Amino acid sequence: MPDLGTRAPRQERLRTGIATRPSGVVLLTDRRAARKPLPQVVAAAVAGGVRWVVLREKDLPRAERAALAADLRPILAEVGGTLVLAGPDPLDGDAVHLPAAGPYPPPPLGLVGRSCHDEAELARLSTEDYVTLSPVYPTRTKPGYGPPLLPHGLAALIERSPVPALALGGIETPDQVAACVEAGAVGVAVLGAIMRADDPTEAAHTLTRAADKATRPRATRREAPTPHDAIPRGATTGPPRSGHVPTTVSTTGLRPTAPTEGSSLTARSGRGRPQPSPRGPQPSPRGPQPSPRGPQPFPEKQPSTGPTEGER
């Protein structure tokens, strides 16, 4: 095992992609609660969308536990998933999840998580990559364990955590998953909801779908707004005001012509000449037209005494 001092700082490992942290629905194993052999339940959960599994079973002898890890890793590897070992021994892997009590400092592995329950435990974190915060709800796995954080308490701890957090404890329904994600968790860790399910695939699918649905709006809110200079000139960026008709700018290659004072409101199409009136030329009721250099004052109307300049 490498020396503890050789482990790169968390920021450097994340920058280089060495550590990928759990998110979505993370399955904690319990072979005694499972209704089928553990590898079958894990395979069913993976079929339902689970990509992270934490192998507990710490009461087994090391050799048996290592054999079980060897059975589970290929199931996850087929879908790009990861097996995490509860405790400091990675069992020939590179990812562990540690209890709040220790060891400190964490072992120099590719991925290290830790269980936390309050601000004091969060303050002890050093090079861990993620935490679980528990219990969020009362849990059947550990009756009386708590008091439960509930979503508001979970949100308060997440605000103080230096690393991403998974919600853990009593999470069994889609609404609970959504509440945890909305509180700021990157995912949820579940045990009984899948281990005890008659159909682990359906249970996993229901929870992962809830996590995805709750995460998507949060990701959308983080998208950068469209830069102002990327909006085409003349285009409207919102609904028109009452009584206002938005102007559409042509982008087909013709230069749009804006009406000018004294000009026809008909856009010039290249043929250029205004069409004559079907009744023939009509005299101007107001006399001479304004100069193209700008509006000029009209002279007072005088009675006609002879041919005009244009009739000579």
Image (tube, rainbow, N blue to C red):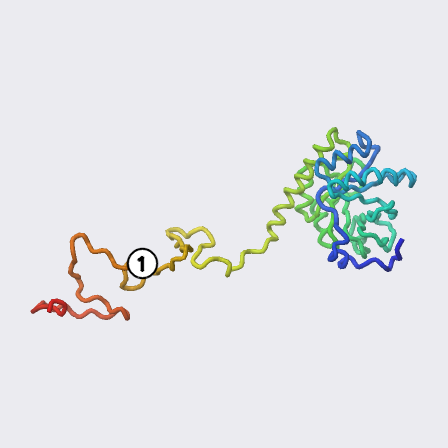
The residue nearer to you, when weighing 142 against 220, is 220
Where does the image place residue 22, in percent across and percent down from the top left? 74, 47
Tell me the crowding category of disc 1: few under 14, some 14 to 19, or many 20 or more residues within 10 angstroms, Cα based.
few
Where does the image place residue 297, in percent across and percent down from the top left? 22, 70
The residue nearer to you, when weighing 18 against 202, is 18
What is the secondary structure assignment of the residue under circle 1?
loop
Q: Quadrant of the image for the C terminus?
A: bottom left
Where does the image place residue 101, in percent across and percent down from the top left? 86, 49
**Residue on which disc 1 sits:** 270
Q: Which residue ends up furthest to the left in the rendered image?
A: 305
Left of 312 or right of it: where is 222? right
Q: Which residue ends up furthest to the front in the rendered image?
A: 271
Q: Image point 84% across, 32% down: which residue?
A: 32
The residue nearer to you, when weighing 300 against 232, is 232
What's the residue type where badge 1 is placed? Gly
Q: Image point 73% across, 30% down: which residue?
A: 199
